[in-house]
Structures are given as C-alpha cells and as structure tokens.
Image (cartoon, rainbow, N blue to C red):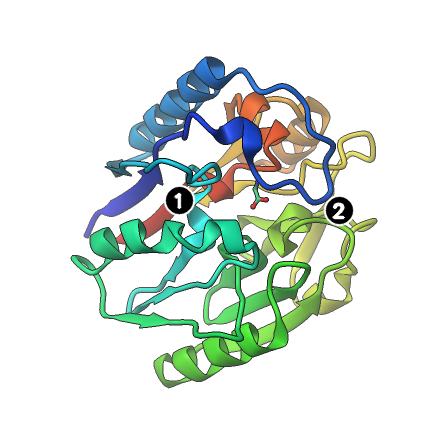
C-alpha cells in the first residue's frame, strides 16, 4: 500500500483569492508556483506519489485542494466549500478521486471546508466556522458513522479554519494556538503550544514520522524538534499570503 498526494496547480488568478482573516498583500505568482513545486518535491521525498489536478480559469483558490474533499480509507466525501467562489473547484477533484474511492457528497444547505476537518484515528474534529456550518457537519457525521468514525464539532471563530489553530504533529500529540482555539476539546491528547510570536504556526502536515512545517515559523519548529519530532521545512510564504497553509495544498490518501 502506497501514499498518494493529490495536489492542484497554482492558478494565475491567485492574487484575487478569498481572504477572511488576512489583509490582501501582493503575491508573487511565479514564486508561489516555485514554492508549490518544491512542496510537491518534499511530498515525493517523503514517499508520496504525486497526482496533479490541472487548474481551470477563475479558480483562484484551487491550489488549496484540501478544502474540496476528505478522503478516508473507506470513502471520500466531496465537500461544499463555504465560499461560493470555491464550489466550482470540486468537480475537477471529483474526476480524480472517483478512481480511488466510492464518493459521497455534502449537499446544500450544508457547507464544509476540508481545512475545518482534523481527522485523528476514528475521530473527525470539525470546525464550526465562517466556512463550515452545522448542516455540513451533520451530513458528514451521517456519512461516516457507518464506517466507524465519530464527528466532534469545535467552534472556530478566531481563524479561517480549525486546522489554522490545531494540527497533529505526532500520534497523540497536537500543535495548537491556544489563543485561537480552546484546548478543552482536545483533552485526550498531548498539546504543544506554538511560539506566541508565530500565531499562524499551528498548521502542519504529518506524514509518517515527519512533519512538513512552514519555514517561516522557526521558533515553533525548534520547539517541535526539542520534543523529538522530525521537522521537514517547506517555504510557503506566497501561499500563506493567500491564507493557505501546509495541509491545504494536498489531499493525502492510501492506495
Ligand atoms: N484563500 C483561501 C481561502 O480563503 O479559502
């Protein structure tokens, strides 16, 4: 069994991306493309086969492919992004995912972004956020319950997505920004706080024994390494200006 990372090209319109908690800054698209290619190389070096979904005109945020689906071993659920401009992204991802999984989907009035879904073993923590609503979370719960998954809603008000504030860095260990999300929902886990000067540092991508982690947050990276966690840095400075982060740029699945 191998790992597949599905990614999606950076769109030339990324400068017009959705922004919710960030002010718009100038994005160097060529550098964003280069950084994204490097991100894919790192995924490859960590054992993933890379499948790239082409982007399409007008899909400014399509590089953030994680928001379009959640892929479990048993099923993939096509999501319904909270930002209406992002809903057309789902069709192109569906075409690829149907080769690997049986599909289900979130229907209106439900909305759900993959960035709000933190899956740990058989629990899916779901951020109730500006992007993901109660109906979307309820629909997901009904879809995955037959596959042995529990869905726990977590109110997320201070950042774009739940995983902007908390992500898994080792089995049973989460990296968290306690100013953005309460640790009370995660009392069964060991929690590592981000460095306070790096508020956006809580999003990381755990792959086997390695954590892909933004190069722009060195103090938090040091903290992780001190705890014996293998950190593989990736420079995502341009995609961060588009309110993106490490997990957003791929869908990881076993095949
Ligand atoms: N720009 C990423 C998002 O807002 O979904």
Indicate if the residue with disc 2 has its beta carbon within 8 Å of ligand 1.
no
Residue 254 percent across, percent down from the top left = 26, 54
What residue do we see at 71% from left, 68% from top? 185
What residue do we see at 48% from left, 79% from top? 139
Left or right of 197, for residue 44: left
Badge 1: few (under 14), some or many (20 or more) residues near its Cα, within 10 Å? few
Residue 222 percent across, percent down from the top left = 67, 26
The span from disc 2 to disc 1 (Cα, nearest Å) is 23 Å
The answer to whether residue 255 is visible is no
Left or right of 8, for residue 246: right
What residue do we see at 55% from left, 27% from top? 15
Of the two numbered discs 2 and 1 on the same chain, state the one appearing first in sequence: 2
The answer to whether residue 58 is visible is yes
Badge 2: few (under 14), some or many (20 or more) residues near its Cα, within 10 Å? many
Q: Quadrant of ligand 1?
A: top right
What residue do we see at 62% from left, 37% from top? 243
The answer to whether the residues at label 2 and label 1 have Cβ atoms under 8 Å apart is no
Quadrant of image for the C terminus = bottom left
Q: To which residue does mark 2 refer? A: 177
Looking at the rendered structure, the secondary structure element under dot 2 is loop
Indicate if the residue with disc 1 has its beta carbon within 8 Å of ligand 1.
no
Disc on res. 208: 1
Disc on res. 129: none
In this rendering, is residue 242 above or below 85?
above
Residue 37 percent across, percent down from the top left = 36, 22
User: Which residue is at the front of the view, 35 or 125?
Assistant: 35
In this rendering, is residue 228 above or below 113?
above
């Amino acid at each position: 069994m191998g790992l597949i990372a599905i990614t999606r090209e950076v769109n030339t319109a990324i400068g017009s991306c959705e922004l919710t908690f960030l002010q718009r800054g100038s994005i160097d698209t060529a550098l964003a493309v280069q950084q994204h290619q490097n991100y894919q190389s790192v995924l490859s070096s960590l054992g993933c086969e890379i499948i790239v979904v082409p982007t399409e005109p007008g899909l400014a945020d399509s590089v953030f492919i994680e928001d379009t689906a959640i892929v479990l071993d048993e099923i993939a659920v096509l999501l319904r992004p909270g930002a209406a401009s992002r809903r057309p992204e789902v069709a192109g991802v569906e075409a690829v995912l149907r080769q690997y999984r049986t599909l289900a989907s979130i229907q209106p009035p439900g909305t759900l972004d993959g960035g709000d879904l933190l899956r740990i073993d058989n629990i899916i923590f779901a951020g109730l956020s500006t992007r993901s609503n109660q109906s979307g979370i309820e629909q997901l719960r009904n879809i995955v319950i037959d596959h042995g998954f529990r869905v726990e809603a977590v109110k997320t008000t201070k950042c774009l997505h739940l995983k902007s504030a908390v992500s898994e860095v080792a089995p049973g260990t989460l990296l968290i920004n306690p100013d953005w999300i309460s640790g009370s929902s995660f009392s069964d886990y060991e929690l590592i706080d981000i460095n306070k000067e790096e508020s956006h540092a809580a999003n990381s991508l755990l792959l086997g024994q390695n954590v892909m982690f933004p190069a722009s947050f060195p103090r938090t990276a040091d903290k992780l390494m001190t705890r014996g966690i293998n950190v593989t840095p990736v420079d995502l400075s341009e995609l961060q200006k588009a309110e993106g982060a490490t997990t957003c740029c791929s869908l990881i699945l076993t095949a």
